[in-house]
Image (cartoon, helix red, strand yellow):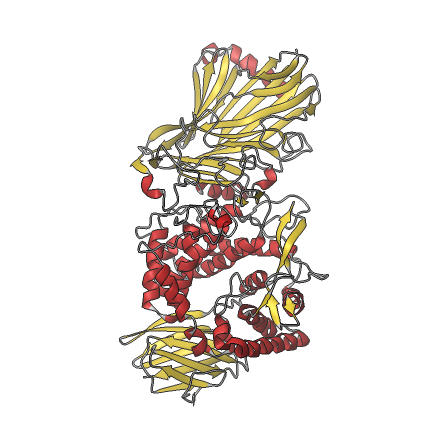
């Protein structure tokens, strides 16, 4: 096939001598232009241009176009011939030749570039065939050098590198050598098969002298950078490919090369080559140590897409999603909803339960603690399940642990976050003792505010000498701020507390300086390595602020941080690896520099992110974000359904990782190896349970609405679903939905003392002391909070509060 094409091409070119002598041949589609340049006796370099503001900007070169490395008769041969024949046809350019290698083998080489109509995409197809057997060490396909210097705005190799400004790839800042070398990683370490660099937008200069921890995205180093606008807006050059393409008819996983900047500092290298890594090519090498046995007459092929598109780095992910038809469909869940409820229930009732202390463990074998978050999940589980015995066991356990908490520490223990990654303060809104429990949070919130810096940040404060090696004491990144901001703003959203809101919004304005989620696990991880956990908590913080204020800028920023979490999620999978699709890499880095997390998913981190993007999806169904001056750029254009699907992908992967039998039943591993082997520690089911419940419409979160009643700006928070909140004159009507025959617990903040409260036509009694688990209402005059406990004879009830 290749040979026939070359014969036809040679005949045609014999009559087109002028074209043969042309120094350049170009094709373009109005958005991307590709130019083949003659070097010596043939075409040896391709240039790629983007059309921006009616002007063509040079962005990348591909040189050499052909690079063949093989074991020859006299040793290794590194052969880089030009291609003599170039054929433009419409939006396509074909370069081809029939060449003799130094050992007399006749090669047929063809490179085809096809530009998509009306899209900034060039489709690349490289083909090689030799009439003699060859022991191939490298066949280079696409081999781009983006830009002409080490300057860039962003770099991305999903699962491995997430770079901003002057951060170099393979940076020893986050790994002890040789672990830092990530130039040719095992392709299975990539969560999304693409690599990209963004240039233009800004020209950013780093200081001449920097320390080991230099990070242009940290509070210490941001003021040291010099910035000026580039004449070209941000443009992303990306290389996309299918890692499962069978390049020799059987084998998959082509090798890749990512250098930012390249070894000689002249641009940023994005490359694909054969044979596969690690079967033939060792990690981080440019050629095989075990040569591939290419048979005489055998054709090898390598396909890819080059994207040259205006926009920031996640434009590459947007384009990849468009190429593959959107987010992949999750694998079928390993069990139905009722079976999942039973498995989670077993984990809580048995596997992480300590019978001696009547408390729960975070992980199997760890010290036990009271855990109201687990109690909340069991409470919901018991009310939702169709299993009568399961319901009985779950609710009996909840009542037992509630009484034990009241005995050991009072209702203050009902807001403890012990053992939980996600659950925060929900239990008293479902079980009772709400006034006392909420009052116990006051000290925690005031302490957060007191420890906040005047600029709105919280700083890295290592607890010991070992942690002090992970970053600079007093520095700040997104991860040192996002969780604290989320807690302040959550409290402000639920209670209407103005001081917490002011402090939280101050943190959000500071966090807009950051661009990459990093630094959320500084108990063991270097603080500057990219990290999915602060992406999740930043989504939570900005969402809480939006719910508290209605400011669409905060919703815009929540979407931005949700987008930055996408490169941590596996969006492709190998056959027979159901844990892989939706698995999440925790950090593009290490623990204490010596244990790499690349290619080793830690699902609990992804489940934190998944839950918060579920809440984002629900919010986006009713509200559209607006930047309103935010400096954070959006790129992915995901719908609420897309965000929900992404959360489902992560959750289903976790369900496959979860043990469904044996002594670890109901738990799931801290990490997995090769998407098969589960590694300790073995974690309680909280993160899986909360995501599964939310996916099925049973989000355990505290529900809040804000209502204007005359001059009163009321904040209504409840464990029940608030189906409606209507204010008229001096009356507030609430429609609440909760489990039939149970009590719901509601607080109305910023209120004055009411005259009466009616529940389904009957007056609720006024309590003289703070409510516990009895029907009635209690007025907290000091804090201007009204507490209501009402019985749901049926799921939906109507409360009428009159002032």
Q: Residue at x 60, y 46 (%)?
A: 600
Q: Nearer the viewer, residue 162 or 469?
A: 469
Image quadrant in which the N terminus is located: top right
Can you tell which quarter of the image residue 391 is in? bottom right
Q: Can residue 768 be seen in the rendering of this structure?
A: yes
Q: Residue at x 40, y 84 (%)?
A: 778
Residue 480 drawn at (x, y percent):
42, 53
For the image shown, how many numbered marks are present on the structure? 0
Image quadrant in which the C terminus is located: bottom left
Left or right of 143, for residue 232: left
Residue 401 drawn at (x, y percent):
58, 75
Q: Residue at x 71, y 62 (%)?
A: 663
Q: Is residue 272 above or below residue 13?
A: below
Q: Is residue 32 above or below residue 796?
A: above
Residue 418 drawn at (x, y percent):
53, 66
Can you tell which quarter of the image residue 335 is in? bottom right
Q: Is residue 767 above or below residue 715?
A: below
Q: Residue placed farthest to the front in the image?
A: 465
Left or right of 520, for residue 220: left
Q: Nearer the viewer, residue 342 or 44?
A: 342
Can you tell which quarter of the image residue 146 is in? top left
Q: Nearer the viewer, residue 668 or 567?
A: 668
Q: Can residue 117 be seen in the rendering of this structure?
A: no
Residue 530 drawn at (x, y percent):
48, 45
Q: Residue placed farthest to the left in the image?
A: 711
């Amino acid at each position: 096939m290749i040979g026939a094409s070359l014969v036809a091409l040679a005949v045609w070119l014999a009559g087109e001598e002028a074209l043969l002598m042309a120094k350049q041949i170009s094709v373009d589609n109005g958005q991307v232009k590709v130019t083949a340049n003659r070097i010596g006796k043939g075409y040896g370099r391709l240039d790629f241009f983007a059309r921006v503001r009616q002007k063509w900007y040079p962005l990348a070169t591909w040189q050499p176009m052909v690079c063949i490395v093989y074991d020859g008769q006299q040793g290794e041969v590194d052969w880089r011939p030009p291609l003599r024949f170039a054929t433009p046809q419409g939006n396509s350019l074909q370069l081809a030749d029939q060449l003799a290698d130094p050992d007399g083998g006749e090669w047929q080489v063809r490179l085809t570039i096809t530009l998509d109509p009306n899209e900034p995409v060039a489709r690349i197809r490289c083909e090689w065939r030799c009439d003699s057997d060859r022991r191939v060490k490298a066949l280079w396909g696409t081999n781009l050098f983006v830009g002409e210097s080490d300057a860039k705005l962003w770099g991305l190799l999903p699962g491995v590198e997430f770079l901003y400004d002057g951060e170099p790839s393979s940076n020893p800042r986050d790994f002890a050598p040789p672990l830092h070398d990530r130039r040719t990683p095992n392709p299975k370490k990539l969560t999304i098969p693409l690599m990209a660099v963004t240039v233009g937008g800004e020209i950013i200069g780093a200081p001449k002298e920097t320390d080991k921890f230099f990070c242009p995205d940290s509070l210490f180093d941001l003021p040291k950078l010099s910035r000026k606008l580039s004449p070209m807006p941000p443009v992303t050059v990306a290389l996309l490919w299918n890692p499962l393409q069978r390049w020799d008819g059987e084998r998959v996983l082509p090798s890749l090369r990512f250098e930012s900047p390249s070894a000689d500092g002249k641009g940023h290298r994005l490359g694909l080559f054969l044979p596969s890594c690690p079967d033939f090519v060792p990690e981080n090498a440019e050629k095989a140590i075990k040569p591939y046995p290419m048979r005489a007459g055998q054709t090898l092929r390598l396909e890819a897409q080059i994207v040259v598109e205006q926009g920031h780095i996640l434009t590459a992910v947007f384009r990849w999603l468009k190429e593959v038809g959107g987010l992949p469909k999750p694998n079928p869940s390993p069990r139905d909803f009722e079976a999942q409820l039973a498995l989670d229930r077993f984990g809580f009732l048995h596997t992480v339960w300590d019978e001696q202390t009547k408390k729960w463990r975070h992980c199997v074998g760890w010290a036990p603690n009271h855990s109201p978050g687990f109690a909340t999940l069991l409470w919901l589980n018991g009310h939702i399940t169709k299993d009568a015995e399961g319901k009985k066991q779950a609710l009996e356990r909840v009542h037992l642990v509630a009484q034990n908490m009241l005995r050991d520490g009072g209702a203050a223990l009902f807001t403890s976050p012990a053992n939980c990654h996600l659950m925060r303060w929900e239990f008293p809104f479902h079980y009772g003792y709400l006034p006392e429990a909420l009052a116990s949070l006051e000290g925690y919130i005031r302490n957060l505010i007191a420890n906040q810096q005047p600029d709105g940040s919280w700083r890295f404060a290592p607890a010991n000498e070992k942690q002090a090696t992970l970053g600079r004491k007093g520095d700040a990144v997104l991860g040192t701020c996002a969780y604290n901001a989320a807690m302040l703003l959550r409290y402000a959203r639920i209670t209407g507390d103005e001081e917490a809101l002011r402090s939280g919004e101050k943190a959000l304005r500071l966090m807009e300086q950051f661009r990459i989620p990093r630094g959320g696990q500084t108990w063991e991880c270097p603080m500057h390595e990219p990290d999915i956990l602060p992406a999740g908590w930043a989504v939570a913080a900005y969402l809480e602020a939006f719910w508290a204020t209605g400011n669409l800028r905060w919703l815009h920023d929540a979407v931005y941080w949700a987008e930055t979490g996408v490169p941590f999620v596996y969006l492709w999978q190998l056959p027979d690896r159901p844990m892989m699709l939706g698995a999440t890499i925790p950090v593009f880095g290490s623990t204490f520099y010596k244990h790499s997390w690349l290619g080793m998913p830690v699902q609990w981190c992804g489940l934190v992110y998944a839950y918060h993007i579920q809440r984002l999806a629900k919010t986006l169904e009713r509200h559209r974000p607006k930047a309103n001056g935010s400096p954070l750029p959006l790129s992915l254009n995901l719908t609420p359904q897309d965000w929900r699907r992404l959360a489902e992908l992560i959750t289903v992967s976790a369900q496959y990782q979860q043990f469904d039998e044996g002594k670890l039943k109901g738990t799931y591993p801290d990490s997995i190896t090769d998407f098969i082997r589960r590694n300790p520690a073995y974690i309680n089911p909280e993160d899986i349970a909360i995501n599964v419940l939310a996916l099925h419409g049973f989000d355990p979160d505290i529900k809040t609405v804000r209502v204007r009643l005359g001059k009163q700006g009321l904040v209504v928070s409840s464990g029940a679903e608030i189906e409606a909140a209507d204010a008229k004159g001096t009356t507030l009507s609430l429609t609440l939905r909760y489990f039939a025959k149970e009590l719901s617990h509601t607080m109305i903040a910023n209120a004055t003392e009411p005259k009466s409260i009616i529940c389904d036509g009957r007056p609720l009694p006024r309590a003289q002391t703070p409510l516990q688990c009895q029907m009635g209402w209690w007025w907290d005059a000091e804090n201007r909070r009204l507490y209501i406990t009402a019985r749901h004879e049926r799921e939906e009830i109507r409360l009428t509060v009159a002032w």
